Image (spheres, helix red, strand yellow):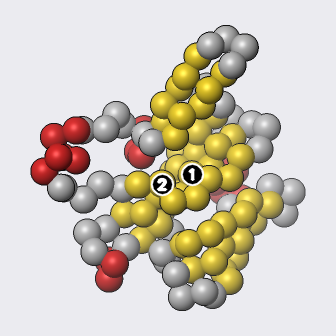
């Protein structure tokens, strides 16, 4: 969960993986649930990297994108488990470091075209 705090308006918006509120019964039972590992922000969007999978051998990353009002905009499933990332909107590229410490580059033009 990520919380956006607006001090001037005294408001808090909570962002959840997949845009869904947390199911506390699943958490208590220990059911695996995606969670956020890294976040990148700019003036328009919040880019949050989630990890999906039941054990490290099946982990994959998913990029969730929100606006600053907390609206879930879209997601992108990645083919690798990403430990760190940075967004270069001007060049429509995401740079990421994998769990194996390899630097990879993703073309995110189609993803950016989906955003309002």
Residue 103, by quadrant, is bottom right
45 left or right of 22 in image: right
Q: Pointers 1 and 2 in contact (CB under 8 A)?
A: yes
Rendered residue at 24%/38% (across/down): 23
Residue most toward the left? 29
Rendered residue at 31%/68% (across/down): 53
Q: Is there any visible trace of residue 36 in the rendered image?
A: yes
Considering only vertical position in the picture, is 24 above or below 102? above
Task: Name which of mark 1 and mark 2 comes first in the sequence.
Answer: 2
SS for callout 1 = strand
Residue most toward the top? 9
Quarter occupied by the N terminus: top left
Q: Is there any visible trace of residue 71 in the rendered image?
A: no
Q: Which residue is mark 2?
A: 36
- CA distance for labels 1 and 2: 6 Å
SS for callout 2 = strand
Rendered residue at 68%/35% (across/down): 116
Residue most toward the right? 90
Q: How many marks?
A: 2
Q: Which residue is mark 1?
A: 48
Residue 87, by quadrant, is bottom right
Rendered residue at 53%/50% (across/down): 64
Instruction: List x then y, in percent, for residue 54.
Output: 25, 69
Instruction: List x then y, in percent, for residue 101.
Output: 60, 86
Q: Residues within 10 Å of mark 1 (few under 14, many from 20)?
A: many
Instruction: List x then y, in percent, for residue 55.
Output: 28, 74
């Amino acid at each position: 969960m990520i919380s956006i705090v607006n001090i001037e308006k005294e408001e808090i918006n909570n962002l959840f993986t997949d845009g869904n509120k947390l199911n506390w019964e699943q958490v208590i039972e220990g059911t695996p649930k995606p969670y956020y590992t890294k976040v990148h922000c700019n003036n328009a969007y919040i880019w949050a990297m989630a990890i999906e999978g039941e054990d490290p051998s099946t982990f994959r990353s998913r990029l969730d994108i929100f606006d600053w009002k907390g609206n879930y905009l879209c997601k992108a499933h990645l083919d690798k488990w990403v430990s760190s990332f940075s967004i270069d909107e001007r060049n429509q590229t995401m740079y990421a470091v994998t769990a194996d410490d390899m630097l990879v580059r993703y073309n995110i033009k189609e993803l950016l075209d989906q955003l309002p």
